[in-house]
Image: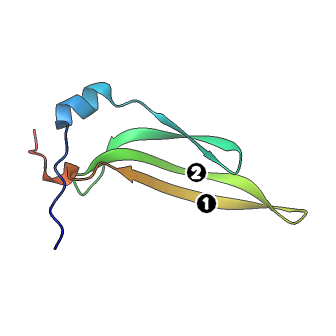
Amino acid sequence: MAAKTTCPVTRQQFKDNAKAIEVVINGQKMIAEPREFSTGSLGWNINGKLVVQIGETPVTVQVGLNLTLLGSNELPKE
């Protein structure tokens, strides 16, 4: 069994210093905002829609993306 990962920042450090992250999907920029997930983990989240091409046809897709700090759900709650 693999060892648990220890998160190198505190919850307060994350809240004070985490900035939005630009993510590019198929050439289209989206912004992942810092957040605390319902699980207690810390990270960034994108929820939105964008248009991609399938052949010559534009289609709308739903984007759901989480970037999670490993080990952050084990950090003490404030």
Nearest the viewer among 10 and 39 is 10
The image quarter in which residue 17 lies:
top left
Q: Is residue 64 above or below residue 7?
A: below
Q: Pick out the residue farthest to the top.
A: 16
31 horizontally vs 35: left or right: right
SS label for mark 2? strand
Which image quadrant: the C terminus? top left
The image quarter in which residue 58 lies:
bottom right
Image x and y of residue 21, in percent: 48, 36
Nearest the viewer among 76 and 3 is 3
**Which residue is under mark 1?**
62
Which image quadrant: the N terminus? bottom left
Label placed on residue 30: none
Amino acid type, callout 1 = Gln
Mark 2 vs 1: CB contact within 8 A: yes
Image x and y of residue 54, in percent: 82, 66
53 horizontally vs 21: left or right: right
Q: Residue at x 44, y 38 (%)?
A: 33
**Which residue is under mark 2?**
48
User: Dot 2: few (<14), some (14–19), or many (≥20) neighbours within 10 Å?
Assistant: few
Image x and y of residue 53, in percent: 81, 60
* Protein image colouring: rainbow
